[in-house]
Amino acid sequence: MAALASSAILSLRLLVLTGLLMAPIGAVAYNKATGASAGKHGAGLVLFVTLQRQAMS
């Protein structure tokens, strides 16, 4: 019984670790699939241009 509990705890740890590592990749993939990005217009354009200018200086 102890071996089963130990195995279950290890499996849950691996599941949580995998979820934490895969969540950002899944969020980016979902964002690209739905097209719900800031884009290059409005506030997104202002932020993009500001970051580009800071990177060049």
Image (cartoon, rainbow, N blue to C red):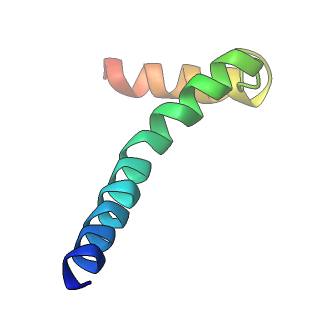
Report the front residue among 28 and 13.
13
Of all residues, the one furthest to the bottom in this rendering is 2
In the image: residue 55, left or right of residue 25: left
Residue 35 placement (x, y as % from top left): 75, 17
- Vertical placement of residue 36 versus 18, above or below: above
Task: Quarter of the image for the N terminus: give it.
Answer: bottom left
Residue projecting furthest to the right: 42
Q: Quadrant of residue 54?
A: top left
Which residue is rendered at x = 69% and y = 26% of the image?
Answer: 44
Tell whether 28 sits left or right of 16: right
- Taking the image as shown, residue 11 lies to the left or right of residue 28, namely left
Camera-side residue of 57 and 30: 30
Left or right of residue 28: residue 34: right
Tell me residue 55's x, y (percent): 34, 23
Residue positioned most to the left: 3
Relative depth, front residue between 57 and 49: 49
Viewport quadrant of the C terminus: top left
- Count how many numbered circles sit on residues in the image: 0
- Name the one closer to the observer, 56 or 18: 18
Q: Which residue corresponds to the image point at 23% horizontal and 76% vertical from the top-left?
A: 6
Where is residue 18 shown, x and y percent of the image?
36, 48
Residue, x 29% and y 79% (percent of image)?
5
**Residue 22: x percent and y percent?**
42, 40
**Residue at the front extreme, as displayed:** 1
**Relative height, residue 4 to residue 19 (above, below):** below
